[in-house]
Image (tube, rainbow, N blue to C red):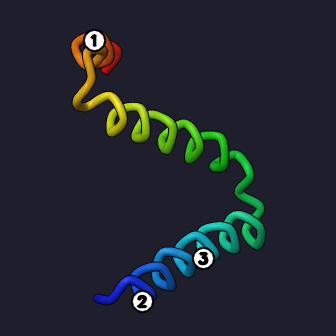
Amino acid sequence: MSEPQRRRHNDSMVREVWSYLRVRKKWWLAPMLLILLGLGAIAVLTESSALAPFIYTVF
């Protein structure tokens, strides 16, 4: 898949999730999604750092 197609696919997925939350009134899912994204970002960003052993104790 080329880069523009991949970007378009990711954009459509974000739009689809946002549309689902908005139409179905599932606002309670938004904080959970943000927390999951945050934890995923922390895991990815600290993967190769000196903080990795300390972060793994959180999980």
Mark 3 lies on residue = 16
**Dot 2 amino acid type:** Gln
Q: Residues within 10 Å of mark 1 (few under 14, many from 20)?
A: few
Please give the name of the residue rendered at 66% of the width and 71% of the height, measured from the top-left corner: 20
Instruction: Say what secondary structure mark 2 lies in.
Output: helix
**Dot 1 amino acid type:** Thr
The answer to whether mark 3 and mark 2 are in CB contact below 8 A is: no
Mark drawn on residue 57: 1
Q: Residues within 10 Å of mark 3 (few under 14, many from 20)?
A: few
Please give the name of the residue rendered at 64% of the width and 75% of the height, measured from the top-left corner: 15
Left or right of 35: which side holds 25? right
Q: Position of residue 16 (x, y in %)?
A: 60, 76
22 over 41 or under it: above or below: below
How far separated are the C-alphas under marks 2 and 1? 38 Å
Q: Earlier in the sequence, mark 2 or mark 1?
A: 2
38 over 23 or under it: above or below: above
How far separated are the C-alphas under marks 1 and 3? 34 Å
Mark drawn on residue 42: none
Instruction: Say what secondary structure mark 3 lies in.
Output: helix
Q: Position of residue 13 (x, y in %)?
A: 52, 75
Q: Earlier in the sequence, mark 1 or mark 3?
A: 3
Mark 2 lies on residue = 5
Please give the name of the residue rendered at 47% of the width and 79% of the height, measured from the top-left corner: 7
Q: Residues within 10 Å of mark 2 (few under 14, many from 20)?
A: few
Q: Earlier in the sequence, mark 3 or mark 2?
A: 2
Please give the name of the residue rendered at 33% of the width and 39% of the height, measured from the top-left corner: 44
Q: Viewer-proximal residue, 12 or 27?
A: 12
